[in-house]
Amino acid sequence: MKLSVQGLNSHYGPAHILFDVALEVGEGEVVALLGRNGAGKSTTFRSIVGLVAQRSGRIVFGGRDVSDRPTHEIVRSGLGYVPEERRIFTDLSVEENLEVGRQPQRPNAPYWTCEKLFTLFPNLGEMRHRAGGRMSGGEQQMLTIARTLMGNPSLVLLDEPSEGLSPKIVEQMVAAIQTMKREGVSMIVSEQNLHFARLISDRAYIIERGRICFGGTMAELDARPDIRDAHLSL
Amino acid sequence: MAFYVAQFLTGLASAASLFLVASGLSIIFGVTRIVNFAHGAFYMLGAYVAFTLTEYFSGAFGFWGGIVAAALAVATLGVLVEIVLLRRIYHAPELFQLLATFGLTLMVEDLVVLIWGPSDLLGRRAPGFKGAVDFFGQSLPSYDLFLIVLGPAVLGILWLLFQRTRWGVLVRAATQDRDMVAALGVNQKWLFTSVFAVGVFLAALGGALQIPRDAVNHAMDLRIIVDVFVVVVIGGLGSIFGAFVAAVLVSELNAFGILIFPKISIILVFLVMAVVLIVRPWGLFGKREAPARRTPGLTVNPWRPLTSAERLAVCIALLAAAALPVIGGNYAVTVGSEIAIFVIFAISLHFLMAVGGLASFGHAAYFGLGAYGVAFLAKMAGLPMIACLLLGPLLGCLGAAVFGFFAVQLSGVYFAMLTLAFAQIVWSVAFQWVEVTGGDNGILGVWPERWASSPSHFYWLSLGIAALAAAGLRILVFSPFGFALRAMRDSPLRSEAVGINGKRVQWTAFVISGTVAGVAGALFAYLKGSVFPDNLGIPLSVDALVMVLLGGVETVSGGIVGAIVYKALNIWLVSQTDLSKLVLGGFIVLIVVAFPKGIVGTLEMIRHRHGGGSSEASSETRLMGSRIETAE
């Protein structure tokens, strides 16, 4: 098991956001985390990488309990995080953004270089020196994924990669995620878009109001239209 | 012509050190969001340590090696400070960090005197740069030429460091979004420490390089820190190039201001700063920033009016205070008057900071204007005391109306800096307009009339006015105006959207606060019988800030408690020890680390934890703790 999360509870101030969230990702697997706006997808990711201060539960990554480790340590152990808001460093060029993400090569994960990433996202290669703030939303989304890959993660938490992108860019994103999978990167991809999720994932979880209410293969999900209709807006 | 060119070059030479210190401050602020008040202290330590090292080691190598070694030694000290102190308070509201570094500054000032003595020290001349260069009949010290070259050289090195190294890229990234940098696997702790080390190194180097030009003394820190604040604000916080341009601009304004307007040379720089901030609030080369963390009014327990039991307790406390002349001697009563006056001063600032969310760094301006108002009316117009006390604070009101109008256009750190600049302008006028204000000699002989002249009568007068002011401001807090002001503090956009004229409300609050400070100043003039420019000085403004933060910004009564504790402690320390600044500074640092919510805030928390016992109370305390985290 690449990543195993058990009994994850998170709070923002007085608000209890996540209730006993449990999920697992196998080696090389792509898992979708589906749910509506505000269901708790981003909070789940933020809690796993330690960006939510008030959390409890057990998070085992690569056989190591990282529940109480600081963010940078979790990330350095090979767990990459791509935030929904992208958070590109707008003053830095594309290459400099990638440099911030750079980490040493890891034995159990694919090794990425700038050049390799520029073949994965050809648009970025054409604007190496452009400031992050002067890129389109789609280009920024590619950059934020590329930036995380520079850390040579073995697992990536990808928060709503298709959000706000044009259909053409979404196609490129699907291709990129499939390439990443082929290279051996495990992923959890949070999505509202079931169609997009189906193109890339092996299994899916559905989260609703901070609780996981379904877990299974895509085929199992398709066999339960009631669940799909109750928890996802299509 | 040659004279002007020579003057220009002298200005450039002065810019070098200023740039070094300012760029250090700017870098530190950019990444850690700490406005490092202790930066002046590190500058001063750099000079002192370099003095000792260059005296000890002889020869050219000894001199230059000594300069660099001094900067390195002070940078090491800076690292220690960062690890031991600052790391604990990165999550605290930003004003607390300012307070902590101010406490450090106080400690360093006393330590320096303890180690190196109180008198000025004249350092060695720089080997190889001892002479002067003849420049069309004007002689220029060759060391100045060295500094002129050094400034741009350091700028170039810093540029390379930030553009061409991984460390530089990480620092620039962290300047924009430090949490994202951590989410990419970078250890923020060590990034912050290294940034702090570089910043302090630059400050100490700036100080060390001054020893061939200027005497080393224990007042260097405050003098440079004001200039440096001005430079980073004009240049734009976080911009190194901006710091360079602004350092040159400020130094040239100083160099030529002396020639053209000898009377207002000090003001000139601050006028330029005020103009820059009004036209470009984020500085010449700074970036427009998202509003700073909303720290001052981070109230989670909504304020409520006093219950009748608490009202009774307040009345009893007031009565007990009024009984002081019965038990205490004249000295105690006079101290009591001073404390009462500072309570008025502190609650005026507390009102602006806690309720309005506006942290003024130049609040002494309105205190001092009130004092001067009284002095003018009493000495020149010969008005009776009651009339003076009523009309004198109007000068503070007027000053607050004029400056406040500009200041409320800004927010956060820039608001603080602009109020600081205005206060410095007022101080300069009082200091330099000798015909009217008496300059440094002040205005003497402002004594109360017979009915108020005995210490106990004056004490009761001060106490009564303090009680009135506190009650008045409290009523305001719970008035519709107070609600509007708090709404503006918590969410400017939403307040404007529900139809609150935000700037007008803040301006009004500023004027009210300035007027109340003026009342305190007016009483102070009568207490001391004299008025001096010090009454408007930056140290007094900082005193007010300390009182408010010590009491607790998030509370309603923090100003009162903070003023009583701080002033009493201050007066007692000065009478007990020669090292009052060291003790006071240590006390401030301790308070910030141990009780980041101030005295009243901490007491409230304890009360909630033990007194209530109900689950609601404990959830509230937890809520208070967590809000600070989410405010990051």
Image: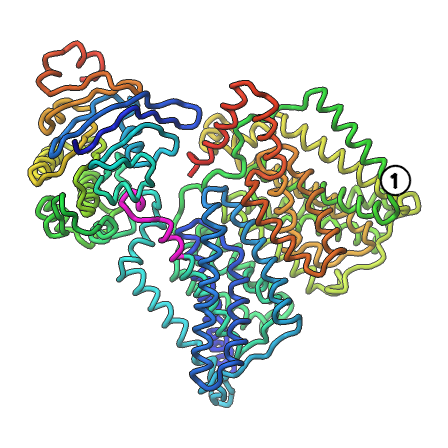
Q: Is residue B369 magenta?
A: no
Residue at the farthest top position: A226
Circle 1 Cα neighbour tier, 10 Å, few/some/many (<14 / 14–19 / ≥20): few
On the image, numbered disc 1 is attached to which residue?
Answer: B327
Q: Which residue lies at the image location 55% right of the left edge and 67% below the top edge?
A: B44
Q: Is residue B192 magenta?
A: yes
Q: Which residues are magenta?
A: B181-195
Q: Which residue lies at the image location 43% right of the left edge and 68% below the top edge?
A: B72
Q: Quadrant of residue B580?
A: bottom right
Indicate left or right for B412 with B424 as reference: left
Residue A16 spot, x, y in % from top left: 38, 22
Residue B518 spot, x, y in % from top left: 72, 45
Indicate left or right for B232 with B585 as reference: left
Q: Is residue B135 above or below residue B520?
A: below
Figure disc tally: 1
Determine the chain carrying the residue at label 1. Answer: B
Q: Quadrant of residue B117?
A: bottom right
Q: Which residue lies at the image location 20% right of the left edge and 17% below the top edge?
A: A214
- Of B372 and B626, the residue lying toward us: B626
Q: Which residue lies at the image location 49% right of the left edge and 42% below the top edge?
A: B92
Q: Is residue B2 visible?
A: no
Looking at the picture, which amino acid does disc 1 mark? Ile
Q: Main secondary structure of the magenta part?
A: helix
Q: Is residue B614 visible?
A: yes
Q: Is residue B564 above or below residue A167?
A: below
Q: Is residue A42 above or below residue A183?
A: above
Determine the secondary structure under disc 1. Answer: helix
- Quick one: quadrant of the C terminus of chain A? top left
Residue B99 spot, x, y in % from top left: 56, 49
Q: Quadrant of residue B223?
A: bottom right
- Quick one: quadrant of the N terminus of chain A? top left
Residue A226 spot, x, y in % from top left: 17, 9
